[in-house]
Image (cartoon, rainbow, N blue to C red):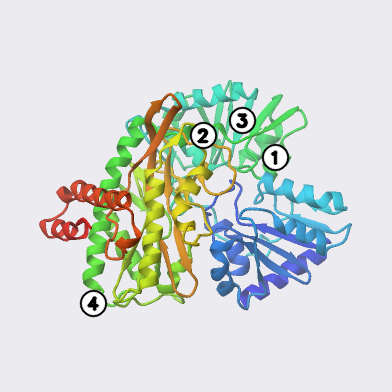
Amino acid sequence: MVHLDRLKKIRSLMHEQGIDAYIIPSSDPHISEYLPDRYKCIEWTSGFTGSAGTLIITHDFAGLWTDGRYFVQATEQLAGTGFELVKLRTQGSAEYAEWLGEKLHAGSCVAFDGNLASLLVAQSVNNTLQPLGFVINGHVDLLDPIWENRPELPQVKAFLLDEKTTGQSTESKIADVRKLLVKNRAESHFISSLDDIAWLLNIRGQDVPCNPVVLSFVYVSAEEVILFIAPDKLSAPDIDTLNKQGVKVATYNEAFSFIKSINTTSILIDPKRTCFAIYDSIPVVVNTIIEKTNPSTSLKAIKNETEIAHIRQTMVKDGVALTKFFKWLEESIHTEALSEISIAEKLEGFRAEQDGFVDISFNTIAGYLDHGALPHYHATPESNYTLKPEGLLLVDSGGQYKTGTTDITRVVSLGNISQEEQDDYTIVLKGTIEGSQAIYPVGSKGYQIDAITRRPIWATLRNYGHGTGHGIGFFLNVHEGPHVFNPTNVDIAIEEGMITSIEPGLYREGKHGIRIENLVLSKKYDSSIFGDFMDFETLTICYIDTDLVNKALLEKTHIDWLNNYNQWVFDQLSPQLTEVEAAWLAKKTQAI
């Protein structure tokens, strides 16, 4: 009933202000994927907790537009809220704008809060609806007046990382960004995205769950760099360090007044990572607004040798934690009352024992039985399954360490596996191996790796509805651009030093889900008269369960890769384990 009441109050305000449709994106002023509690507007309004979606409210309809990762979850969470699920055909697209154009008449007013909508979203709405005679108002916040006890912005301290950790100084990173600004003929640059700021200034924080970022904005020009951040977020020594690096420090709220008063002829902003309110505040004196991906996004995607060395060490720590967890799970399933929630907490505990652990990198997906078929499932007290010694368990998890970020998915058998489950598992494993073994020409794009990975899965008339891989940060966001491995025609080449996940899957709704995920490093391979080629180094160090493998479905190359990988896992981890743990892992990594 609480969400019905909130919907009623929103519609009352819409009526008072002459608004025919109100748009609520899943975002904040920094266009973040994961949000501080203050900006969890979709969850507060509708009860939906997924990380991607858009609410549309009219006077006679309320809907959530989201993609296939969340269809089952949204159906369950929206029941009785007054909101209906509307299934997106294309992930990330603004299909609701077309729907509004069909449902409402010319002269209708469509409103949204420009602090929450990216410039790209605002442009999609404007470009679709203005030609139809709609009135668009991007400066309306209908939630704040009715949101009682709305959470304040977090006040946790931020901190700086030293060059021994990052491998590159703040001054050097700023210089690299300035070079790209010159290349793009931009006099200035305004950065809203928190991971770009964290990378540029070697700063980390705890303002967003699972992502070590701090709420802030940054302005860069040839003459100055200004960090807009809440007072008291930084210690006096850290402020002094930033000042010596050429960075001025101003208060967080000053960013909005500053952008209105900038005196520059051109400014570069990222339309995907800048909110409409910031864009709309740029004064007319700025003759040219260059809309391009933040230069720092491409720079931070290529990890330097120091970062790569740290992440290799981090993978050993993470692998030790995972080994201890899966050993505990196998032994405890017969003796303890285990649930999806309790095992996620246990896994976090094993990671917390590792040196340098800071936080999990996202909410652990522990999906038992049919919950494994929900790619972004997160157990709640209401949905929480009790585990039994039968069926498949999917565990997708990761850690934030001071020396790197991890993300891994494994599926294990708890007992009594069907032939269908075994075959599905083996087919997905073939995809993981094919992607991991890929050799590809310099300049190849992510959609090519996506197709290579899917090939053995497609060959069995199977498929999965999400991308094959995403970039990952260095002690930063677990999802990082600009490159992706998915079917879309993203014109971003795979470059040496990029770290990406390879995570094919297979999901049978109401039955089970399978996903096998490793992180890989793109690197030089060899050259021939036909050009230069690259391949991947697998970084993730955790055994792949062979109990589920139907060997008859694998070719010799797949079997060799699996045996070599599991042997490498044992060699890397056994020196860090107890004698009993190493003996257990030796059995798990035996060649098939």
Answer few, some or many: residues within 10 Å of disc 4's Cα (few below 14, many 20 plus, some between 14 and 19).
few
Q: Secondary structure at mark 4?
A: loop
Q: CA distance from mark 2 to mark 3?
A: 15 Å
The quarter in which the N terminus is drawn is bottom right
457 shown above or below 29: below
**Residue where numbered disc 3 is placed:** 189
Taking depth in this image into account, of 96 and 434 the one nearest to the observer is: 434
Judge from the rendering whether residue 159 lies leftward or rightward of residue 55; answer left or right.
left
**Residue where numbered disc 4 is placed:** 334
Residue 390 pos. (x, y %): 31, 76
The quarter in which the C terminus is drawn is bottom left
Circles 3 and 4, Cβ within 8 Å, touching? The answer is no
Mark drawn on residue 298: 2
Between tags 2 and 3, which lies in front? Answer: 2
Q: Secondary structure at mark 2?
A: helix
Residue 10 pos. (x, y %): 72, 67
Taking depth in this image into account, of 388 and 462 the one nearest to the observer is: 462
Circles 2 and 3, Cβ within 8 Å, touching? The answer is no
Q: Secondary structure at mark 3?
A: strand
Residue 210 pos. (x, y %): 43, 53
The answer to which of marks 4 and 1 sits earlier in the sequence is 1
